[in-house]
Image (cartoon, helix red, strand yellow):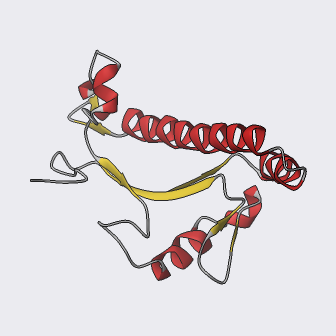
Amino acid sequence: FQLVTMGQPIADFANVLFKEDNYRDYLEVHGIGVQLTEALAEFWHRRIREELTLDGHSVADEDPADVLDYFKLGYRGARYSFGYGACPDLEDRVKLVELLDANRIGVILSEELQLHPEQSTDAFVLLHPEAKYFNA
């Protein structure tokens, strides 16, 4: 399981920009916050693959040499987040947030089961070789 956040300061700054009708800067700050959150989630996903060993080898040893293959999800396993197609039930998020004690890193769950600050994401990571987002 993983839960990452960029924290409340970037959300607060984006909200100030929005309230000041500075929409372009708001969108850029919000966008970079969301992208940094996703990058942090990918970083920790990589760390999980590095730390898991099978037959004396790190699962990350199977990661692609070409960085562009990461965008094609060319590594072993997948990160699944609640509310998306593979696991649509947001109620399961409650269990993950409690298990990981999200409040200790400043993340709370709203009544609508959304993570706050907005620049946060949670997931569970499966490292099975056939774990993919779509198997068509």
Residue 104 appears at what percent x and percent y?
Answer: 75, 61
Left/right of residue 75 with respect to residue 101 in the rendered view:
left
Q: Residue at x 85, y 52 (%)?
A: 12
Residue 22 appears at what percent x and percent y?
Answer: 83, 44
Vertical placement of 89 versus 69: above or below? below
- Looking at the image, how many numbered discs can be counted on the residues? 0
Toward the left, the furthest residue is 136
Left/right of residue 12 with respect to residue 53 in the rendered view:
right
Regarding residue 1, the answer to whether it shows in the image is no
Toward the top, the furthest residue is 66
Residue 94 appears at what percent x and percent y?
Answer: 56, 78
Along the line of sight, the residue nearer the viewer: 47 or 85:
85
Along the line of sight, the residue nearer the viewer: 8 or 95:
8
Q: Quadrant of residue 27?
A: top right
Residue 98 appears at what percent x and percent y?
Answer: 61, 74
Along the line of sight, the residue nearer the viewer: 130 or 27:
27
Regarding residue 16, the answer to whether it shows in the image is yes
Q: Residue at x 61, y 37 (%)?
A: 36
Q: Quadrant of residue 19?
A: bottom right
Left/right of residue 38 with respect to residue 7 in the rendered view:
left
Q: Residue at x 65, y 36 (%)?
A: 32
